[in-house]
Image (cartoon, helix red, strand yellow):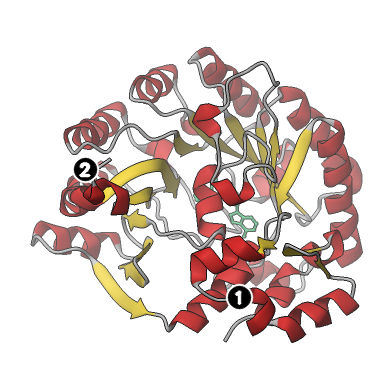
Amino acid sequence: MSDANATRISSLYIHVPFCAQKCAYCAFYSEPSGGDLINRYVAALIREMEIVADDLKPRTIFFGGGTPSLLNLRQWKQILDAMARLNLFGADEFTVECNPATVSADKAGLLRDFGVNRISMGVQSLDEKLLDRLGRIHTREMVFKSFDLLRRAGFDNLNLDLMFAIPGQTMDIWRATLNEALALGSEHLSCYEVIYEDDTPLFAQLQAGEFDVNEDLACAMYDEFIGRAAAAGFRQYEIANFGKDKPLTMPSATLSPPSGVRDAVPSYACRHNINYWRGGSFYGLGPSATSYVRGVRTKNWANTQLYCEQLEAGKRAIESREELPPLKRAGETVAFGLRMTAGWPFEEFQRTTNFDLRREWPAEMNQLTERGWGKIASDHFRLTPRGLRFADAAAELFLR
Ligand SMILES: C[S@@+](CC[C@H](N)C(=O)[O-])C[C@H]1O[C@@H](n2cnc3c(N)ncnc32)[C@H](O)[C@@H]1O
Ligand code: SF4
C-alpha cells in the first residue's frame, strides 16, 4: 500500500434525507419529498463524492437516513456508477438502511450486484396498532415479506431495528414482537428505548399528558430483551447492539473488526459503527451529515435545498467546522467508547488519543466503580451492565 493509501480515510457515511412520511418519534434530518428534489440531491451527492474521493479508501460504507431504500432504481444506479468511477468500492462492510415498505426485488438485486453486503431494516414493532401509533408506513406482513426478499437476493448479514418502551406497549406485546423478530433469524439486532426528541409529535403528546413514561417497565423490557437475545445466540457489544457469531467453520476475514476489539465483539458486529465508538475518522456526505477527519469535525447544512445549491456552485455544503482541543476530544472519545461492553483497553485508548485514561481520569473511574457502574481491570476500564443502562450520565463525567 502506498503512503497516500495508508493515510486515506477508511469510513464513509452517506445521509439520504428523504422518507415517505415522518414517524412520530423521529428527529433525524429527513423530509417527505417528491422526485425533483431527490434527483437534485443525487446529482449534488455525486458532486460531493467527487470532491472528497481522493482522500477516501473505504473499508466500511453506510447509507443511512432518512430512508435510503426510498431512492428508485435509476437514482441508485447513478450513485453506484459514480462510486465505481471514483474507486470508492471494495469495502469489507457496505450497509444500506431500508424501510420494509420500500424494498423491492429489483432494488435488492441491484444493491447486491454493486457489493452491498449488509442491510439494516427499521422494524420497530411487529404489533399493527403500535406501528400505526408510531406513524410507520409499513405493516407487519411487509416486514416478513421484505426479510424473505432480502434473503432471496443473497443478503446473509441482516440487521433489524426494534424499539421498546413505546407508549401503549405492554410487556406481553413486547414479548410477542421479540418472539417473531428472533424467529426471523437475523444476524444482528439493534434495540432502542424510545427517546422523546424535541419537536416530534410523540414528545408533544407526552408534554400534553396523553401518557406517562414508566421507567420500571422500560428497564424490565430491556432486561427481557438481553435475556432473550442471549438465548438466541446474540452477543451484546454495545448498549443497543447485538450480533451473532459466525460458526467456526466459516471464514471471518471479511468481517474482522479493528484489532483492539477483535475478541470482544461478535463476528457480525457493525464495523462501521465501531469506528465511531472508537473515535476513528470518517467522512459524512449528504445534508446534515458530520465528518471527523484528522482532528477536524465538520457538519453539513441540514437543509437539502441549500445543500444542493452549494454543491451546484462547486462548494462543499459545510455549515460549521470545529477543531477540538486534544483533551476535549479525548474526553468525548472516552464517552463514546464506554458505550461498548468492551469499554476502553488502556493501551488502545492511548494509541487513539495520546492520553492515558488512568492518568487523566482516575477519580471518575473510581467514582463509577464505587457506584457499581464501572469496573477497572489491569488492562481496561468498562461499564457494568447497570452502568451501561446509565451510560449517558456516566459518560458525562469524562467530558472536559
Ligand atoms: C434512520 S432510522 C432506520 C431506517 C429507516 N429510516 C426506518 O426507519 O425504517 C434509524 C433507527 O433509529 C431508531 N430511532 C429513530 N428515532 C428514535 C427515537 N426517537 N427513539 C429511539 N429510537 C429511534 C429506529 O429504530 C430507527 O430504525
Ligand atoms: S424512523 Fe426512519 S422512516 Fe421514520 S422518519 Fe425516521 S428516518 Fe424516516
The percent position of residue 42, horizontal first and vertical second, equals 23, 44
**Which residue corresponds to mark 2?**
39
**Which residue corresponds to mark 1?**
356
Mark 1 and 2 residues: CB-CB less than 8 Å, in contact? no
The amino acid type, in three-letter code, at marker 1 is Asp
Circle on res. 53: none
Q: CA distance from mark 1 to mark 2?
A: 48 Å
Q: Secondary structure under badge 2?
A: helix
| Front residue of this view, candidates 299 and 4 | 4
Which quadrant of the view contains residue 338?
A: bottom right
Q: Secondary structure under badge 1?
A: loop
Residue 342 visible in rendering: yes
Numbered circles on residues, count: 2
| Front residue of this view, candidates 306 and 156 | 156
The percent position of residue 6, horizontal first and vertical second, equals 31, 49
Q: With respect to residue 212, does 136 lie above or below? A: above
Q: With respect to residue 86, does 23 lie above or below? A: below
- Location of the C terminus by quadrant is bottom right
Which residue sits at x=81%, y=53%?
168
Residue 208 visible in rendering: no
